[in-house]
Image (cartoon, grey):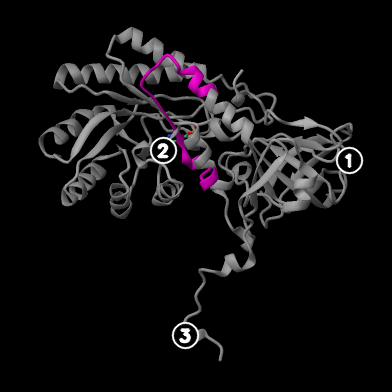
Amino acid sequence: MSENQFIKPISTEKKDNLTIGGCDLVELAKEYGTPLYVIDEATLRGICKSYKQAFKEYENIKMMYACKALCTSAIIRILDEEDFGFDTVSAGEIYTVYKSGVDMQKVLFNGNNKSAQEIQLALEYGVGRFSVDNFHEAELLNNIAAAKGVTAEILLRITPGIECHTHDYIKTGQTDSKFGFDLTQLDSIINLIKTSYKNLNLRGLHAHIGSQIFETQCYYDEVEILVKEIARIKKEYGISLDEMNIGGGLGVKYTESDTPPSVSVLSDAVTNAMNKYAIDIPTIYIEPGRSIISTAGVTLYTVGSTKQVPNGRKYVAVDGGMADNPRPSMYQAQYTAEVANKPGCENTEKVTIAGRFCESGDILIENVDLPKLEAGDIICFYNTGAYNYSMSSNYNRVEKPAMVLVNNSQSDIIVYRETLDNLIANDNIPDRLRRK
Ligand SMILES: Cc1ncc(COP(=O)(O)O)c(C=O)c1O
């Protein structure tokens, strides 16, 4: 089993209250307020080690954490200590990684529409690799690199034409996708690089087939396509591509019915494809996000109002919702919750947990069995480490929650709760509207 196959952080315990990392969740809620994101350092470091263990046979393996899942300075520090590099997709992510003291050679810049300013910044900070997504970007990157008198080390992102059964919005490897070069466009871009783009150095290929993937076959298919293309490019162009990035996408267990494969599935896929095509083993990049950070994170909410619809369901409202976790309203994501201050109590009620935001669709969990809930109870949502804070918003002009890191009975703040002044910090009142 690897950590992505658990619903709860590995340090979760039931005492008088639920505890994680040796910290009482009710006490954390009191000390830091709610909603509160809590990250369990032991689970995070544990999954990093599981990834390293799964790929231990490969000398040239580069683990890249996909920052889009959760990007804060302390999280970056931990992953840096665990020898991960970083997959970034914006100036903001690059800047956070840079300011966290990371060797920028360990950074890869991904994305389907990188701006000239972002490319400039990435070159200035010495980002190690660019995953070039399309023809426009190849020309833009070449021109900016030429003007600076440098060479950009690149991978080409391809769409391998693989359908994996995950939600449509998080599926990226199928042919009709906004990301990457279609396989039929690969020869054109290679010819352009050979003949015209002298400031691009082609190092390898990159693919990413989607997110929250449970099927193992699509990884085998993906790696096979990458390896086959690398072998073909060597034969037809004499170009030895010594790098292969297989992306991220491994699923996690949000509910009991989820059955994500363990991380060794990825290494098995690589090994099998290598054996089949007998190419020189390239440096292999993998760039997981969700499976690294999701299980390590939980969110604590305080129960407020309840509404019993006559002859209908019971709504229990909490003090957060779609602004701190947009996934349920965006793609009907399912979560598992427990009441942190009632860990031993029997489930006696079926309730719908509603958020506090002004949208009827702001529902966090429908029809969940829980102990009888009262105002002031603390509800713990599991598996919220990925794509919660990183997708959060200030909808309804509500401050974003704080985040704490827990380990060995110690809690440390890693993101401060926003203040009301933070909310208006970037506002400007034009002179003609100013009051004397
Ligand atoms: C190119 C790329 N790599 C890696 C990831 C990380 O995926 P996941 O969080 O599912 O592991 C994504 C997510 O969308 C991505 O687009």
User: Which quadrant, please, contains the C terminus?
Assistant: bottom right
Classify mark 1: helix, strand or loop: loop
Residue type beneath disc 3: Asp
Residue at x 84%, y 41% (from the top left corner): 341
Residue 158 sits in quarter? top left
Mark 1 and 2 residues: CB-CB less than 8 Å, in contact?
Answer: no
Mark 3 and 2 residues: CB-CB less than 8 Å, in contact?
Answer: no
Q: How far from the left and from the top, in percent, is residue 89?
A: 40, 44
| Distance from mark 1 CB to nearest ligand 1 atom below 8 Å | no
Q: How far from the left and from the top, in percent, is residue 351?
A: 81, 40
Please state which of residues 175 and 336 is positioned toward the viewer in this rendering.
Answer: 336
Q: Tell me: 54 left or right of 298.
A: left
Q: Tell me: 135 left or right of 297.
A: left
Above-or-below relation of 42 to 223: below
Q: Which residue is mark 1?
A: 372
Residue at x 15%, y 36% (from the top left corner): 192
Crowding near pointer 2: few (<14 within 10 Å), some, many (20+)?
many
Q: Which residue is mark 3?
A: 431
Query: From mark 1 to mark 3, how far is it between C-alphas?
Result: 54 Å
Residue type beneath disc 2: Asp
Q: Tell me: 174 left or right of 384.
A: left
| Distance from mark 2 CB to nearest ligand 1 atom below 8 Å | yes
Residue type beneath disc 1: Lys
Residue range of the region highlighted in magenta in the rendering: 50-74
Q: Which residue is mark 2?
A: 87
Number of labelled discs? 3
